[in-house]
Amino acid sequence: MRIIAIFILFFIPFFIFTEKLNFKIDVGSKYKSEARIDGEYYINNILFTYYSQRYKTISQIKEKDFQLGKINDKNYYYQLFNGKNYSYKEIEKVLEVDYALDPSGLVFIQPGYALPTMRNAPFFPDQDLKVGDQWQKKATEVQDFFKDNILSHIPVDIKYEIKDIYQSGDIKIALIQYDYQFNFINQTKSIIHPKIQQLAGISSTKLYFDITNGWRIKEEYQRNYSFLITDQTTDLEQMHQMIDSGTRKWTVIERMKKEEVEKELKKQLEEEKIEEVEVEQDEQGVKITLENIQFEAESAFLRDSEKSRLNKIAEILKKYKEKEILVKGHTTDKGTPEGRKKLSQQRAQVVSEYLFDKKAIDPDKTSFYGVGDSEPIADNRTEAGMKKNRRVEIYILEE
């Protein structure tokens, strides 16, 4: 009997162990989340296409107003690009959004934004919680189903349950299951895309939440959505279905010593006598700007004279090979908008691949992006201005 009593006393703390869960609003904190979604799309029960999406979100808590955190999200959407001997990422688009978040998970945002997709989820009640506790809370999922900028705001009622609480190193983690399903006829046409007649779906998510630091660590989800639509060209009804799964992983962004990196880069550039190069800090990290970068006329082929400069840049960059790198291309205002965009992408790609070949940067940690003439730094009406705008920027990223 004594042994049984000791056994019971030993296990009592496990059953009564409780924790308070909430988001910690620490001004200046930055987080990176990386997401992957893979799925199948059906029309009238026939497989129409496979789809895959990769994106990265950089979230920064900019301000705190009482309990509300003012958050800025930058969302980078990628496509994987296969080069000669490696794979790396091309940024297709960047979406930026500002919103407010309270410690319970409630989101406050201006209308018209597609992101964040989930509003008011996850949500944490203002009480101590233990393994096995359950609660419900209404939320909204926002989707641009047809990529036409007409947003559907899906009201959902989410059921939560704490599956586990455990210690991992210095942090305490809660494993939370949250699920929802919906099925309704689109009568008002005001919050759901007007061509959707009926919408039904089920979603299931596992969330790993860092109790100690008050932020998400990982989400794994599966969903199956169906919607009955009217084809606007034939006026016939079609049943569409999307079945996918995905993961998101969050990490805390460690602050870079930007001033030291900038100082060291400037010193090396001066020692190597590399001309028409600027170095400066910005919010993303430290930026190296190669002005008047030399390609063959209206092409993405590097001139031999430019390769000499890039060889020296490559040697300098080898010191930062463990960092993520962004290569960003720019053009003057000559040509068509589509042509300028494409040319800037090609030039950023060519510079990236040249630096890969020189073993200066890691393809797995590199992305490239072309913005055409949308970010001029000088007047395109002068030759001196065009030289400055005809540039490639190499970012050593903090994130």
Image (spheres, rainbow, N blue to C red):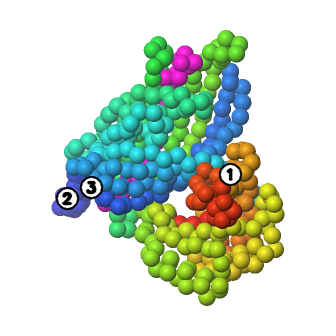
- The secondary element bearing badge 1 is classed as loop
Which class describes the residues within 10 Å of circle 1: few (<14), some (14-19), or many (20+)?
some
Residue 9: x percent and y percent? Answer: 19, 58
Magenta segment includes 30:
no
Instruction: Select label 2 or label 3 by which is in front.
Output: 3
* 328 sits to left or right of 398: right
Which class describes the residues within 10 Å of circle 2: few (<14), some (14-19), or many (20+)?
few
Image quadrant containing the N terminus: bottom left
Per the picture, the main secondary structure of the magenta-coloured stretch is: strand
Magenta segment includes 209:
yes
What residue span does the magenta drawing correspond to? 192-216
| Disc with the residue nearer the chain's start (2 vs 1) | 2
| Residue type, label 2 | Leu
| Residue type, label 3 | Phe
- The secondary element bearing badge 2 is classed as helix
- The secondary element bearing badge 3 is classed as helix
* Residue designated by label 1: 333
- Which residue is at a point 64% across and 48% down the rendered structure image? 92
Which class describes the residues within 10 Å of circle 3: few (<14), some (14-19), or many (20+)?
few
- Which residue is at a point 55% across and 31% down the rendered structure image? 149
Q: Is residue 164 visible?
A: no
| Disc with the residue nearer the chain's start (3 vs 1) | 3
Q: Nearer the viewer, residue 25 or 42?
A: 25
Q: Are marks 2 and 3 in contact (CB under 8 Å)?
A: no
* Residue designated by label 3: 14
Residue 150: x percent and y percent? Answer: 54, 28
- Which residue is at a point 42% across and 69% down the rendered structure image? 255
* Residue designated by label 2: 9
